[in-house]
């Protein structure tokens, strides 16, 4: 193959890949998965889960001994007390000390054990909270996705209506020239075409805005080339409307994350009471400490008449360190007698929070029951609305066809014919609206039943 041919081949391949990349259309499953991986709120919730894990490490660390070491070195210059004679004299001394202390809780009213149990519950609650965030984002993405599909189909309806009216304008010109209809009817059709153009522009803008909203929900930066795949199949594949609201609620009680969060928070509140009550009990701590010291000073030597005849060097470092070492160990018992009612108030405060958590569980159960029954009723109503809209569209289509036949032979004026067209367009839009409203409301019922929007 010639060099120019190779260049042309490579260019065609790269251009084809570029076009393919720009023409990628996202499915609902891809949108939900991408949002779960990249949404800012979900990332923040993931950080909360990591914080809960760190809190567990803190709770586990309370069972471990505490160990601290210390060391110091000082210089004393000038008038100092001689460590040998006890007399004051000008000299330079150095002093080094070192020590280590260790303490361990032997008994603390089971507060450490309960704190660890609470930390484990907090991890569970954080995981449920993350799952709840993911479910909420998935529903929001599904709603935004279906809104894009609705706007795209509505745009097609408006474009098709514009095409019909443009053809009708040409046909009206022929009828005016033939003297079958007055010229005023042609002007009415022209005005209708202009209005259809405005509707197409508005529908196109609605598509762009809904795509932008979905792209922002996905945290996509390159939203200009973003588009979704048409997935407008109207099916209740899981046959949710064959269920009863009571059976769906029974599944929701077992599966819904918000109820699990409330129940976990109730368990955490119970642990807080036990931790607070632990402060009523005595605490027993064991301790051990080690210390030693080393000093540096030239000790003078005197003769019988008190004259200095030389200096005596200090003992080596490790010799002094070994000779001066000391240890202590024991146990400390602390019994709370009176603490300004702080322990009692903490217990009472924890009990109040426990009651709040108990009420929150009851409220979640009531809300869940109401939401399930409402979602089921809304889904049934949406299906009936869609079926009614389809029936109305069929009737409007027949009425439009009849009006067109009469208009073509001059038996109907342009105003009445335009009214028939408008009613047909409105009926088409209503079918689209009720269709996607039904799809989304079925998704909500599936959501409460425990059926995920996407398969793992």
Image: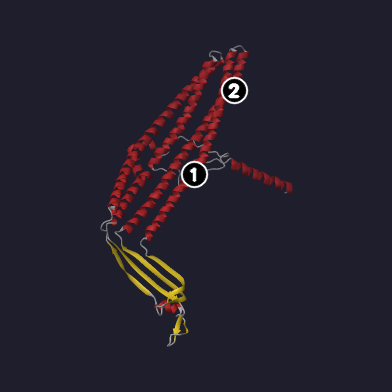
| Residue that lies at the very extreme toward the front in this rendered image | 305
Q: Please tell me which residue is depicted at 35% across the width and 54% down the height of the picture.
A: 118
Q: Nearer the viewer, mark 2 or mark 1?
A: 1
Residue 244 seen by the camera: no
Please tell me how crowded label 2 is: few (under 14), some (14-19), or many (20+) other residues with Cα within 10 Å: some
Pinpoint residue 411: horizontal percent, then vertical percent. 54, 13
Pinpoint residue 211: horizontal percent, then vertical percent. 53, 37
Q: Please tell me which residue is depicted at 68% across the width and 45% down the height of the picture.
A: 11
Secondary structure at numbered mark 1: helix
Q: Classify residue 271 as left or right of residue 386.
A: left
Q: Classify residue 396 as left or right of residue 340.
A: right
In this view, the residue in front, 20 or 200, is: 200
Q: Residue 199: which quarter of the image?
A: top right
First of labels 2, 1 by sequence position: 1
Secondary structure at numbered mark 2: helix
- Up/down of 123 relative to 372, above or below: below
- Up/down of 335 relative to 156, above or below: below
What sort of colour scheme is used for the picture?
A: secondary structure
For the residues labelled 2 and 1, say whether their Cβ atoms are less than 8 Å apart. no
Residue 364 seen by the camera: yes
Residue 382: mark in rendering: none
| Residue that lies at the very extreme toward the left in this rendered image | 337
Please tell me how crowded label 1 is: few (under 14), some (14-19), or many (20+) other residues with Cα within 10 Å: many
Q: Classify residue 139 as left or right of residue 152.
A: left
Q: Residue 414: which quarter of the image?
A: top right
Residue 35: mark in rendering: 1
In this view, the residue in front, 224 or 324, is: 324
Q: Please tell me which residue is depicted at 47% across the width and 48% down the height of the picture.
A: 43
Pinpoint residue 202: horizontal percent, then vertical percent. 54, 29
Whole-Å distance between the Cαs marked 2 and 1?
42 Å
Instruction: Determine which residue is flagged by label 2.
Output: 166
């Amino acid at each position: 193959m010639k060099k120019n041919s190779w260049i042309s081949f490579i260019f065609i391949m790269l251009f084809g890949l570029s076009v393919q990349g720009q023409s990628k259309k996202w499915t609902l499953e891809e949108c939900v998965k991408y949002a779960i991986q990249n949404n800012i709120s979900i990332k923040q919730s993931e950080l909360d889960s990591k914080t809960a894990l760190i809190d567990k490490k803190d709770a586990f660390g309370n069972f471990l001994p505490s160990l601290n070491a210390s060391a110091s070195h000082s210089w004393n210059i000038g008038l100092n007390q001689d460590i040998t004679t006890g007399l004051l004299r000008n000299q330079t001394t150095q002093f080094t000390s070192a020590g280590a202390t260790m303490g361990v809780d032997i008994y603390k009213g089971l507060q450490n054990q309960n704190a660890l149990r609470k930390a484990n519950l907090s991890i569970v609650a954080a995981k449920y909270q993350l799952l709840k965030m993911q479910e909420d984002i998935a529903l929001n993405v599904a709603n935004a996705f279906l809104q894009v599909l609705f706007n795209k189909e509505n745009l097609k309806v408006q474009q098709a209506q514009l095409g019909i009216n443009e053809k009708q304008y040409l046909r009206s010109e022929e009828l005016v020239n033939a003297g079958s209809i007055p010229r005023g009817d042609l002007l009415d059709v022209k005005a209708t075409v202009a209005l259809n153009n405005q509707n197409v522009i508005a529908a196109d803008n609605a598509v762009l805005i809904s795509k932008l909203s979905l792209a922002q929900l996905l945290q996509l930066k390159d939203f200009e080339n973003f588009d979704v795949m048409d997935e407008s199949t109207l099916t209740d594949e899981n046959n949710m409307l064959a269920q009863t609201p009571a059976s769906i609620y029974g599944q929701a009680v077992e599966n819904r994350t918000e109820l699990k969060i409330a129940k976990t928070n109730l368990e955490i509140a119970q642990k807080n009471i036990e931790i607070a009550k632990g402060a009523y009990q005595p605490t027993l701590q064991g301790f051990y400490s080690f210390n030693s010291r080393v000093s540096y000073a030239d000790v003078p030597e005197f003769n019988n008449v008190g004259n200095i005849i030389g200096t005596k060097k200090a003992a080596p470092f490790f010799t002094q360190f070994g000779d001066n070492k000391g240890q202590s160990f024991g146990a400390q018992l602390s019994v709370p007698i009176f603490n300004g009612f702080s322990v009692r108030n903490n217990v009472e405060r924890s009990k109040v929070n426990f009651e709040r958590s108990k009420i929150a569980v009851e409220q979640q159960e009531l809300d869940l029951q109401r939401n399930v029954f409402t979602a089921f009723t809304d889904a049934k109503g949406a299906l009936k609305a869609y079926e009614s809209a389809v029936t109305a569209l069929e009737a409007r289509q027949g009425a439009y066809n009849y009006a067109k036949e009469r208009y073509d032979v001059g038996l109907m004026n342009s105003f009445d014919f335009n009214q028939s067209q408008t009613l047909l367009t409105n009926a088409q839009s209503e079918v689209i609206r009720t269709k996607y409203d039904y799809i989304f409301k079925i998704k909500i019922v599936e959501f409460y039943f425990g059926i995920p929007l996407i398969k793992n």
